[in-house]
Image (cartoon, helix red, strand yellow):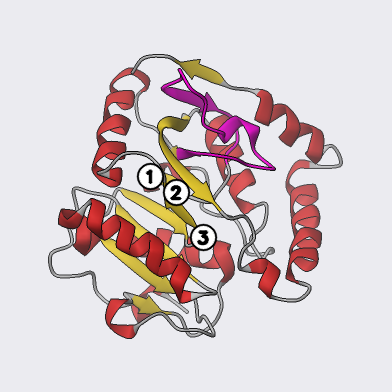
């Protein structure tokens, strides 16, 4: 599938704002929860809030779907295609959401996050990846919300809700997931490359989400085990035998900002 097969952007799409894409797979109710939450929170962003139906067995309502793929692209394939598409349409940022999360901070979510990101960039320069903090995480302690902290600069990021600068992704060589169709670990390698090439990665502790980890993957028999094997092989090829030590060390590398 190539970008030329994709539909055009909505007529009122605002190129001065990020493209906000919700990846739909699994129960439509999960996607609806986040989709409606964003539309109610930031109604003026509606043309930029797009649902990508990843050939889900339970399709998202056609009238509310921006695009339905012809096959399951998994996370990395869908993310990669969105990066390519929005680069071709001169969009500067892509905010890519798993559908199994929802915001828990104050509205408006998108407007608040973008304003805070812009203030951070006045101090740090262009940011490669921005993410809301998550209420709990079994995998990424560096991304868990903490009271008294405004933002944290981190070295590696979870990919559940990344807002990426497309220039930064392009500069580090793109998503780099051709040999990992399931996509697990791709977010770690991308964020680590961004960090290594000088692009700040930020977690915003004042914009928070709750994520239901693996809610869709658990519903597909054997998927988690298969994806985990692919992740190990993928990270081994990228980082070598000590890949887990590298990842664990990166998770500990954080710098907190108490003001923005």
Is residue 23 visible from the viewing direction of this image? yes
- Picture coordinates of residue 215, whole percent (x, y): 61, 63
First-in-chain label (3 vs 2): 3
Q: Nearer the viewer, residue 77 or 102?
A: 102
Report how far apart the C-alphas of labels 3 and 2 lie in the structure: 27 Å
Q: Which residues are magenta?
A: 132-157
Query: Tag 2: Cα neighbours inside 10 Å, few (<14), some, or many (≥20)?
Result: few
Question: Does residue 234 show up magenta in the picture?
Answer: no
Judged left or right of residue 18, residue 173 is right
The residue under label 1 is 167
Residue 21 placement, left or right of 30: left
Q: Residue at x 36, y 52 (%)?
A: 94
Residue 100 marker: 3
Q: Is residue 137 magenta?
A: yes
How many numbered marks are there? 3
Between label 3 and label 2, give the one nearer the viewer: 3
Circle number at residue 170: 2
For the residue labelled by badge 1, is the local secondary structure a helix, a strand or a loop?
helix
Image side of residue 184 versus residue 60, left or right: right
Tags 1 and 2 touching, CB below 8 Å: yes
Quadrant occupied by the C terminus? top left
- Looking at the rendered image, the disc whose residue lies closer to the viewer, 1 or 3, is 3
What percent of the width, then of the height, locates residue 16?
A: 18, 48
In the drawing, does residue 99 fall left or right of residue 112? Answer: right
From where the camera sits, is residue 87 visible? no
């Amino acid at each position: 599938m190539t970008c030329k097969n994709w539909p055009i952007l909505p007529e009122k799409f605002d190129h001065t704002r990020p493209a906000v894409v919700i990846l739909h797979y699994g129960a439509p109710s999960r996607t609806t929860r986040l989709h409606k939450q964003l539309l109610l929170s930031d109604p003026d962003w509606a043309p930029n809030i797009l649902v990508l139906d990843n050939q889900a067995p339970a399709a998202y309502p056609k009238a509310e779907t921006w695009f339905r793929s012809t096959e399951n692209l998994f996370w990395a394939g869908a993310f990669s295609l969105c990066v390519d598409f929005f680069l071709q349409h001169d969009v500067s940022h892509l905010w890519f959401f798993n559908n199994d999360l929802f915001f828990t901070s104050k509205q408006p979510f998108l407007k608040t996050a973008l304003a805070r990101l812009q203030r951070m960039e006045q101090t740090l320069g262009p940011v490669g990846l921005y993410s809301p903090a998550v209420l709990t995480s079994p995998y990424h302690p560096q991304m868990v919300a903490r009271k008294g902290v405004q933002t944290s600069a981190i070295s590696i990021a979870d990919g559940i809700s990344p807002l990426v600068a497309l220039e930064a992704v392009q500069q580090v060589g793109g998503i780099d997931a051709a040999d990992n169709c399931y996509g697990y670990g791709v977010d770690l390698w991308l964020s680590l490359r961004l960090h290594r090439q000088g692009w700040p990665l930020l977690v915003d502790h004042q914009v928070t989400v709750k994520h239901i980890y693996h809610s869709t993957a658990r519903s597909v028999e054997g998927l988690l085990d298969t994806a985990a094997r692919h992740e190990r092989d993928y990270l081994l090829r990228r980082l070598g035998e000590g890949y887990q030590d590298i990842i664990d060390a990166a998770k500990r590398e954080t710098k907190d900002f108490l003001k923005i």
